Amino acid sequence: MREEGTALYKIYVTAAPEDGKANEAVIKLLAKNLGVAKSSLTIMRGHTSRDKVIKIER
């Protein structure tokens, strides 16, 4: 169940899941498509998991 004011996105990246490369690719892709700075996105949960919770500060 999602909290009100949240969104669910399914994202696929081709970056390897090593040394944080896949996480960086996810942040870059989200920032570009949402029109926000990469620094406004923070991975809250799931640094080493396929499922992630990302906080967006505007």
Image (tube, rainbow, N blue to C red):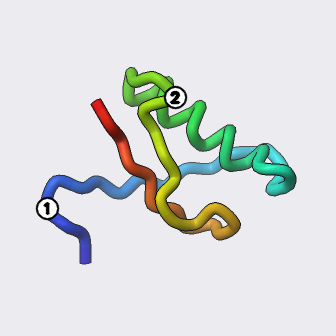
Instruction: Report the label total.
Output: 2
Q: Give the residue at mark 2.
A: 38
Q: Nearer the viewer, mark 2 or mark 1?
A: 2
- Please name the amino acid that badge 2 sits on: Lys
- 36 versus 12 height, above or below: above
Q: Give the residue at mark 1.
A: 4
- Between 53 and 10, the residue placed more toward the observer is 53
Report the residue that reaches farthest toward the bottom: 1
Which element carries disc 2, helix, strand or loop? helix
Calculate the distance from the C-alpha at mark 2 to the C-alpha at mark 1.
Answer: 23 Å
Quadrant hosting residue 53: bottom left
- Between 43 and 31, the residue placed more toward the observer is 43
How would you rate the neighbour count of disc 1 (Cα within 10 Å): few for under 14, some for 14-19, many for 20 or more? few
Residue at 50% in and 29% down = 39
Q: Give residue 55's position: percent from left, percent from top.
A: 38, 49
Q: Are marks 2 and 1 in contact (CB under 8 Å)?
A: no
Report the residue that reaches farthest toward the left: 4
> In the image, 10: left or right of 16?
left
Residue at 42% in and 32% down = 40
- 13 versus 57 height, above or below: below
> In the image, 20: left or right of 23?
right
Screen quadrant of the C terminus: top left
- Please name the amino acid that badge 1 sits on: Glu
Nearer-N-terminus badge (2/1):
1
> In the image, 6: left or right of 18?
left
Q: Give residue 28's position: percent from left, percent from top.
A: 59, 31
Residue at 38% in and 29% down = 34
Residue 32 - label: none
Q: Give residue 3's position: percent from left, percent from top.
A: 19, 67
How would you rate the neighbour count of disc 2 (Cα within 10 Å): few for under 14, some for 14-19, many for 20 or more? some
